[in-house]
Structures are given as C-alpha cells and as structure tokens.
Amino acid sequence: MTIHRKKIVVAVTGASGAVYASVLLEKLQQLSDQIETVGLVLSDNAKDVWEYELGDRSFEQLPYTVYDKNDFFAPFASGSARFDTMIVCPCSMGTMARIASGVSDDLITRAADVVLKERRRLILVVRDTPYSLIHLNNMKTVTEAGGIICPASPSFYSRPKDFRALAATVVDRVIDLAGLQHKSYRWSEK
C-alpha cells in the first residue's frame, strides 16, 4: 500500500506563543515518515518573539527549507506545487485579518490564499485573547472559506508536567487536524 506523504507549509507569525511553533516543528520532525516536505516561513516579528520568549534562535537550525517572507517564488506560492496543508502557528490577528480579506501581501498570506482557493487544509492557531467582534468575524470568514480555527487553548486533563508539555496539548490537536498519525493523550483511553 502506498502512503501519501504530505507536503506541509508552516508559517510562524509574531503573535506570542513561539513555544507552540517550536513544539510543532519538533513533532513534525518525529513524523517525517509521513511527510514529503515542510516549507517554513517566519515573519520578522516571529523571529524576534521566538528569541525573546524561548531565549534562542533555534529556528535557524531546523532541517527545513526556510523561505523569506517576501519570496513569491517559494513552491507553495502556487497551487501547482500541491501542498496539502498549511499551519499558521501561532497566528496573529493581523495575519488572520489579511487572510480573511484575501490580502496576499507576503508569502504567508499568499500561501494561505492558495491553500484556500485549492480547497486544501488551512489551520490557523490563533493565540491572542480576548477576541473582538472583528476577530470573531474574521474567524467566521476563514471558516466559511474552508479554513480551520484552532485556538491555542491548552488542555489540562493530561496533566502536563511542564511548559512544552502544556503547549503539546494544542500541537497534538493541530497534528490531528493536519491528518497525521501520532501518539498522544486521548481522553478516556488507557
């Protein structure tokens, strides 16, 4: 049986929550047998927030091709490259607003536009809180266009032991939404 290996875009914006992106990228490395390629793009603010919150620039050592935020020659800037899934983690409200409005002013928003027009999977891991009516309306617009809003709201029933384990409760849901098979805490399973 041939297993379809996924092509995934991961975009990291400047919203607080770099730990979510770090844990996601680490887990995707562990699932490499299910993944053909991961394309990574970080906004300028994402790099600054990552360094501030995590105290390092470990995103520079990841085994993925990192694309400049203005590189419209990146493969996932076109639907012909057939990337299956795009995960924006964390997703700022500004990025979500541009996606909801169809404003493709950088590679992140262009790739999201492509994923939506091709009817592929777009997952926005929104982090900001509380939500204004504008945020909620943008979430509604993205959802109606076929995107998935996955708020970075950690769960506690698995009794996470540290900061990264807590972030993993969100990331594990994102990985499920991306259609990847993995082991994680499942409610009421032994």
Image: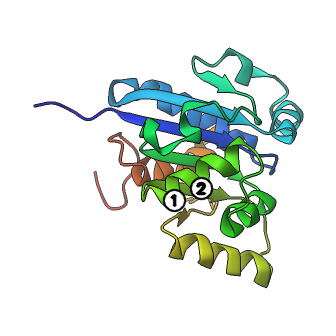
Going by the numbered disc 1, the residue's amino acid type is Leu
Q: Residues within 10 Å of mark 1 (few under 14, many from 20)?
A: many
| Mark sitting on residue 116 | 1
Q: Position of residue 26 (x, y in %)?
A: 56, 28
Q: Identify the residue shown where x is 32% and y is 61%.
A: 188
Image point 75% across, 47% down: which residue? 17
Mark 2 lies on a secondary structure that is: helix
Q: Point out residue 87 in the picture as x, y percentages from the top left corner.
A: 56, 47
Q: Identify the residue under disc 2.
A: 113
Classify the position of the N terminus by image quarter. top left
Q: Residue at x 65, y 49 (%)?
A: 110
Q: How many marks?
A: 2
Q: Is residue 149 left or right of residue 90?
A: left
Task: Reply above or below: 140 against 124.
Answer: below
* Residue 174 shows up from this direction: yes
| In contact (CB < 8 Å): disc 1 and disc 2 | yes
